[in-house]
Amino acid sequence: MRRAGVAVALALVACGNRAAPAPSSEPPVAARPAAPAKGTVVTTSFRSDALGVDKDVVVYLPAGYDANPTKRWPVIYYLHGLTGDETNWTKLGKLDEAADALGLGAIIVMPDGDNSFYVDASATPDYAACMKDGSGLFIPTQPKAKTCVRAARYETYVVRDLVGWVDRTYRTIPAREARGIAGLSMGGYGALVLGMRHPDAFAVVASHSGVDALLYGGPYPYEQGKVTLITDPKLWARALPELAAWMRGIYGDDLATWQAHDPAVLARQLAPGKLALYLDCGTEDDFKLDNGMRYLHDELVERGIEHEYYLGPGRHNFTFWKERVPHSLAFFQKHLEAAR
């Protein structure tokens, strides 16, 4: 028994004298950053007098919109491209996720612009024929109930009907200083044209891979000082023959009408400081729109009009646009901040 007691005593002493374990050399596990607050995406519709039909629209309401019932917000309009629709920006471009990550303090409105180039067209559609067999549509197999209109006044639809409806429906800051417009491809073109033609309605404009110079005729690749411009709309078919008939249905054959809707021409009448402008395009753009963007960029530089400009690797697709969307959103966040 004595031996057993000594053994236990020795064991207790050994435990008491055991060296403390060395501190771990691994850094402590960092706390996970809080997930960004999420906004809300809603799909609704409204009546457009300019088109004579109801149109669908997707709206992003920023985080905090519901929790602050007296707060008013800036608004950014994002326009889709040719053959696209109002769902493209969220489904393919993940615009809502980019806005959440940025903590964007603005409402984003994404309307259905059909294949209109966001222009009040010279031709009047035949609504009955369109509803019957798709006559007059760029793609006759598109859903007729969604795409046929009684009048093709898409500039008026966006600037008057849509903006007015948004300001009546949501808690906006109803002033140009708190309103921006952006788009991709056809929508980038539309954003530039609507912004430049209506600087009383919009203060900030962004174009992703837009048709930034409607009458650009070459050279390809672009060379400063050597640009030729199309002076006969019938010759526009040489650039994109598959679009020629459609474009002439929108603009007609009057050169003055084309010039009145050409961002590179409109830029010559733009006063410095009137609009905050953002441009980007990929160097491998499938339609070589980077050439027109470079031309518009040089026109803006020559006239002392400040703007943000990016030309880098990328094609005419959502791989490029998803990467650039955070940049245009940040541009809007910066320039619309003063209006909040």
Image (spheres, rainbow, N blue to C red):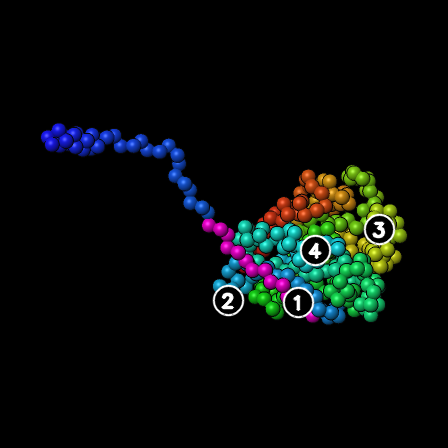
Q: Earlier in the sequence, mark 3 or mark 4?
A: 4
Residue under label 2:
69
Within 10 Å of the Cα at label 3, are there few (<14), some (14-19), or many (20+) other Cα atoms?
Answer: few
Q: CA distance from mark 1 to mark 3?
A: 32 Å
- Apparent side of residue 184 relative to residue 28 in the rendered image (left or right): right
User: Which residue is rendered at x = 61% and y = 58% of the image?
Assistant: 108
User: Do labels 3 and 2 touch, CB within 8 Å?
Assistant: no
Query: Mark 2 belongs to which amino acid?
Result: Pro
In this rendering, would 111 be left or right of 337? right
Q: Secondary structure at mark 3?
A: helix
Of labels 3 and 2, the one closer to you:
3
* 121 shown above or below 21: below
Which of the marked residues, 3 or 2, is nearer the chain's N terminus? 2
Place of residue 61 in the rendered image (x, y in percent of width and height, measured from the top left)? 57, 61
Q: Which mark is residue 80?
A: 4
The magenta stretch is 34-47
